[in-house]
């Protein structure tokens, strides 16, 4: 139990589907993150939210749409994805973004397969 | 921008042997450095965090990391490998200056295999 919970753990979706990934943190943190982990590629930061405000979008295609209704919840809405979007999507949280020594805590990840 | 390089994408050791994983970073200012472990089908778990207060930091599961400021590198070690240590290990460095202050940059990971 890491304090960061992601659902669903596995998702298979067609290219025309709309689905969402959900993340909840129970650590009292104010920053939340989405990372993408693909086979044979380094971990890629996608989005950062600090106190519910998006502070970083790392050139992510618009078919990925994040939502952060409060500091404890983060969603990633998925629409018209491509097969190359199949990956492990990791949610993470930390006390706040931009602090030196900021420790990031990860969830278990959501395995996404686009068919 | 910070760059982090982990030496060796795969490391293989025998059970009971020394584990040694290496990480180099580019920052000229001593940063905060983290080692994470990812077991199969799981997320990343924090192994240890280095904050420049000491040159050697003890983490979970018997791992420890030595921080070599002059070489801008970190070595993650465990004296005796166990089968349960088989996982992927990530080094991450927090930027200590500029517009990316506090941002974590990850290395590409090292897969550790432990043979009986």
Image: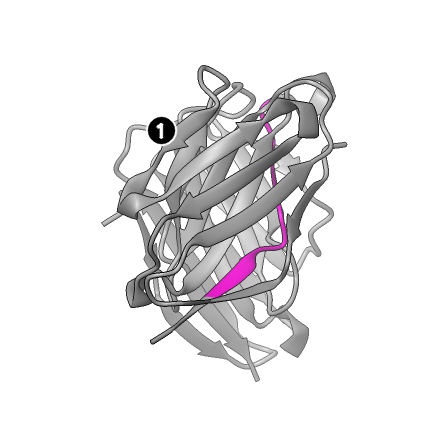
Residue in the picture at 60% in, 69% down = A39
Residue A94 visible? The answer is no
Q: Which of the two residues, A86 or A68, is positioned nearer the viewer here?
A: A86
In the image: residue A97, left or right of residue B87? right
Name of the residue lying farthest toward the left:
A1
Q: Which residues are magenta?
A: B102-112
Name of the residue lying farthest toward the bottom:
A115
- Which residue is label 1 attached to? A29
Residue B80 visible? The answer is yes
Residue in the picture at 36% in, 44% down = B63
Give the tally of numbered discs.
1
In the image: residue B48, left or right of residue A57? left
In the image: residue A42, left or right of residue B88? right
Is residue B108 highlighted in magenta? yes
Does B44 sit above or below residue B32? below
Element under disc 1: loop
Is residue B111 highlighted in magenta? yes
Residue B9 lies, in percent from the top left, at: 62, 62
Residue B107 lies, in percent from the top left, at: 62, 48
Name the image quarter holding residue A74.
top left
Residue in the picture at 39% in, 65% down = B86
């Amino acid at each position: 139990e890491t304090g960061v919970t992601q659902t669903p753990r596995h998702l298979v979706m067609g290219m025309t589907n709309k689905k969402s990934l959900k993340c909840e943190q129970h650590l009292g943190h104010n920053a939340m993150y989405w990372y993408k982990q693909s086979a044979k590629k380094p971990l890629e930061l996608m989005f950062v939210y600090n106190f519910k405000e998006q502070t970083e979008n790392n050139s992510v295609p618009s078919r990925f749409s994040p939502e952060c209704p409060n500091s404890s919840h983060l969603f990633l809405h998925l629409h018209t994805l491509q097969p190359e979007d199949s990956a492990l999507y990791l949610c993470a949280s930390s006390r706040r973004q931009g602090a030196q020594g900021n420790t990031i805590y990860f969830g278990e990840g959501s395995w996404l397969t686009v068919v | 921008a910070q760059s982090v390089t982990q030496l060796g994408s795969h490391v293989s050791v025998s059970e009971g042997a020394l584990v040694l994983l290496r990480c180099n970073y580019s920052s000229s200012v001593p940063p905060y450095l983290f080692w994470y472990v990812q077991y199969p089908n799981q997320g990343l778990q924090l192994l240890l965090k280095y904050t420049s207060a000491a040159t050697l930091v003890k983490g979970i599961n018997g791992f420890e990391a030595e921080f070599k400021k002059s070489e801008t590198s970190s070595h993650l070690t465990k004296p005796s490998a166990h089968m349960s240590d088989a996982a992927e290990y990530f080094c991450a460095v927090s930027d200590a200056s500029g517009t990316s202050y506090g941002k974590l940059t990850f290395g590409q990971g090292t897969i550790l295999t432990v043979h009986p």
